[in-house]
C-alpha cells in the first residue's frame, strides 16, 4: 500500500502574527494565524505546523494563546513548537490543543528529551525539527533559529536525524536553511539522504515555489510530506490545485478541498 503524501502549510509566528523571511532573516508579516489555518483547512491541507520563532519565555503565554486559537479553527492535525525545552513545556502546548510537538535546539542540547516526550505522548506525536545547511563536511545542524551551529559545527544533519529517530522521534521536519524562502526548490539531495537514513517519515521544508518542486521532492527526494509557507500565504499555489497536479502525475495524495456540511 502506498501512503499518501502530505501537504503541510507552516505558520511561523512572532508574537501574534504569522511572519516569513528568507533564510530565517528579514521577517515580514503574513497575516493572522487562526485565519490562515482555517483557510488552509478548507483548501485541503493535511496538517498545520505552527512554530514560535521568537521562542523566548516572555512570549510563551502569547504562543499558547495562538495555539488555542489555531486549534479551534482546525479539523486537521496541528503540530506546534518553538521554545519547548522540557516535558512540562510540551504538556502546556498539548493542553493548548496541539496534536504533535516539535523540538529542535533543546533536543540537540539534551537528546534524552526525545525519549521523555515519546514516553509521555507516543513517538507519533514527537517531531524532531532539524535546520541544516551545506558545509564542507556535509549538511550541518544549526540551532536557535538558524543562528548558531550545533555543537560548534560538528553535528551532521543526517546522522542526527537517524539518532533522533532511534531516541523516540516519530517524524523528522527537515529544513534547508540554504533554500528557505528562496523559492529555488527543495534540497533534493538533503531530503533523499535523510529519508534513506531513517525509518520514520521525513517532512521536506525550504525552497518551494512551484507544483513541480513538490513533485520532485516526493519523487527523487523520497519525502513523505512537504511543508511550505509564503507560497501558500500569498496564494501563489492553491493547495487543492497542487494536489490535483500531483494526483494527475501519479502521486497519492489525501483529500482536496473540504466539503461544506449539507
Image (tube, rainbow, N blue to C red):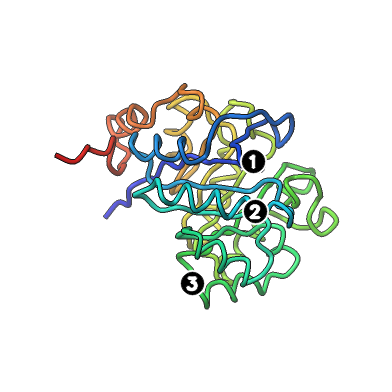
Using the image, tell me which numbered label, if any, was put on residue 121. 3
Give the SS element for disc 1.
Answer: strand
Q: Earlier in the sequence, mark 2 or mark 1?
A: 2
Instruction: Tell me where residue 178 appears, x and y as whole percent.
Output: 69, 35
Q: Which part of the image, by quadrant, shows the C terminus?
A: top left
Give the SS element for disc 3.
Answer: helix
Q: Which part of the image, by quadrant, shows the N terminus?
A: bottom left
Task: Classify residue 147 by image quadrant.
Answer: top right
Q: Earlier in the sequence, mark 1 or mark 3?
A: 3
Q: Which residue is mark 1?
A: 176
Along the viewing direction, whichever of 246 and 116 lies nearer the viewer: 116
Q: Earlier in the sequence, mark 3 or mark 2?
A: 2
Instruction: Tell me where residue 227 appears, x and y as whole percent.
Output: 50, 41
Badge 1: how crowded within 10 Å, few (<14), some, or many (20+)? many
* Residue drawn at the location 50% of the way across and 52% of the way down: 202
Marks 1/3 in contact by CB < 8 Å: the verdict is: no
Along the viewing direction, whichever of 53 and 2 lies nearer the viewer: 53
110 to 174, vertically: above or below: below
Marks 3/2 in contact by CB < 8 Å: the verdict is: no
Amino acid at each position: 500500500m502506498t501512503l499518501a503524501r502530505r501537504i503541510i502549510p507552516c505558520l511561523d509566528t512572532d508574537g501574534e502574527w504569522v511572519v516569513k523571511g528568507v533564510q530565517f532573516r528579514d521577517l515580514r508579516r503574513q497575516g493572522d494565524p487562526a485565519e490562515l489555518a482555517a483557510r488552509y483547512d478548507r483548501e485541503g491541507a493535511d496538517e498545520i505546523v505552527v512554530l514560535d520563532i521568537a521562542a523566548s519565555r516572555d512570549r510563551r503565554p502569547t504562543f499558547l494563546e495562538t495555539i488555542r486559537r489555531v486549534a479551534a479553527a482546525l479539523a486537521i492535525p496541528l503540530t506546534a513548537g518553538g521554545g519547548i525545552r522540557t516535558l512540562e513545556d510540551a504538556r502546556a502546548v498539548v493542553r493548548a490543543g496541539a496534536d504533535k510537538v516539535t523540538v529542535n535546539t533543546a533536543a540537540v542540547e539534551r537528546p534524552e528529551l526525545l525519549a521523555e516526550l515519546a514516553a509521555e505522548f507516543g513517538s507519533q506525536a514527537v517531531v524532531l525539527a532539524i535546520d541544516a545547511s551545506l558545509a564542507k563536511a556535509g549538511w550541518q545542524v544549526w540551532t536557535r533559529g538558524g543562528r548558531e551551529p550545533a555543537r560548534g559545527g560538528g553535528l551532521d544533519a543526517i546522522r542526527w536525524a537517524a539518532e533522533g529517530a532511534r531516541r523516540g522521534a516519530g517524524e523528522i521536519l527537515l529544513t534547508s536553511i540554504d533554500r528557505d524562502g528562496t523559492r529555488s526548490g527543495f534540497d533534493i539531495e538533503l531530503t533523499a539522504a535523510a529519508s534513506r537514513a531513517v525509518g520514520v517519515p521525513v517532512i521536506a521544508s525550504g525552497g518551494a515555489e512551484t507544483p513541480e518542486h513538490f513533485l520532485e521532492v516526493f519523487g527523487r527526494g523520497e519525502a513523505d510530506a512537504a511543508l511550505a509557507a509564503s507560497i501558500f500565504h500569498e496564494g501563489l499555489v492553491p493547495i487543492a490545485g497542487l494536489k490535483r497536479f500531483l494526483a494527475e502525475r501519479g502521486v497519492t495524495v489525501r483529500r482536496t478541498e473540504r466539503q461544506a456540511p449539507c
